Amino acid sequence: MPTIFNGIPWYDQHQQAVNVSGGCLIQENGKYYLFGEYHQAASIEFAGFSRYVSSDLEHWEFTGLALPLQPSGLLEPHRIGDRVKVVRAQTGQYIMLMHTDDERYFDPVIAYATADRLTDTFTFRGPLLFNDQPIRMWHIGSFTDNDGTNYLLTHEGDIYRLATDGTTAETKIISNLAPGTEAPAMFRFHNHYFFLASQKTSWDHNDNVYFTADQFDQLTGPWTPHGQSGKWSHLDLLTNRKMWCRRTVTMHQPVLAWKY
């Protein structure tokens, strides 16, 4: 039985701290793949997205950068890359979604990269387009429904359905579901959809909020707001600590179990 420790750094096979801020976890063939921002000391510039692999969620192996710094373009030197999300397209290819920006956060663009396998180095493709235009948002999330359809989530509560190959946003399902929020996430429990978000208080803690849609296979809603779903405590980001927060879902309420 693995033991997962909260509030302290995790270490890889080289006894180096797991360097994977803003992590995204995906499971395949009995293994867990953890992707996130690879940070260098005293710098916010993009240095790559790291990849770690585990069979038990306790022991992690660093397998290198899933997407390295690019020589030019949206992820060239002196730019930002964060909020990485990885989904499996219905074609079988893997799509890495991310927020790119300049150092002042004045040039937000949602971009994507592709790979045939989770163990491959991803190939950067450029901006994710909707109606032939880049999506200029910064906080993003992703959701894969039971039928394999993938969705892009953004701050303020916008939801886009991705094309079958995951390389474009083909439909905007919802606009402004959760105004004043960021860090969107979504899951499905039985026939209920849950949309969770954090209020915009920078790194300060706040009461997270959530919404539900109860019609089977209807992300268009109607969506019902339910208020608080949990509170984040302020953490020192420089220590690279990791937290597992288990949620127990009872009908329309996702209960957060906050334990150290």
Image: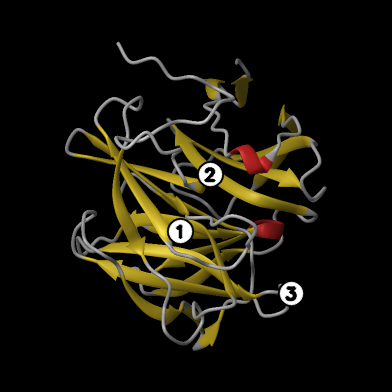
Residue 163 in view in this figure: no
Q: Which mark is nearer the camera, 1 or 3?
A: 3
Coordinates of residue 19 in the picture (x, y in percent)? 47, 46
> Are the residues tagged 2 and 1 within 8 Å (C-beta)?
yes
Q: Give the labeled residue for mark 2.
A: 186
Counting residues from the start of the chain, the first of labels 1 and 3 encountered is 3
Query: Which amino acid is tagged 3?
Result: Arg
Element under label 3?
Answer: loop
In which quadrant of the rendered view does residue 138 lie?
Answer: bottom right
Which residue occupies the foreground of this view, 112 or 260? 260
> Which label sits on residue 151?
1
- Count of marks, rendered view: 3
Disc 3 marks which residue? 104
Q: Quadrant of the N terminus?
A: top left
Badge 2 or badge 3: first in the primary sequence: 3
> Could you tell which of marks 2 and 1 lies nearer the N-terminus?
1
Amino acid type of the residue tagged 1 in the rendering: Tyr
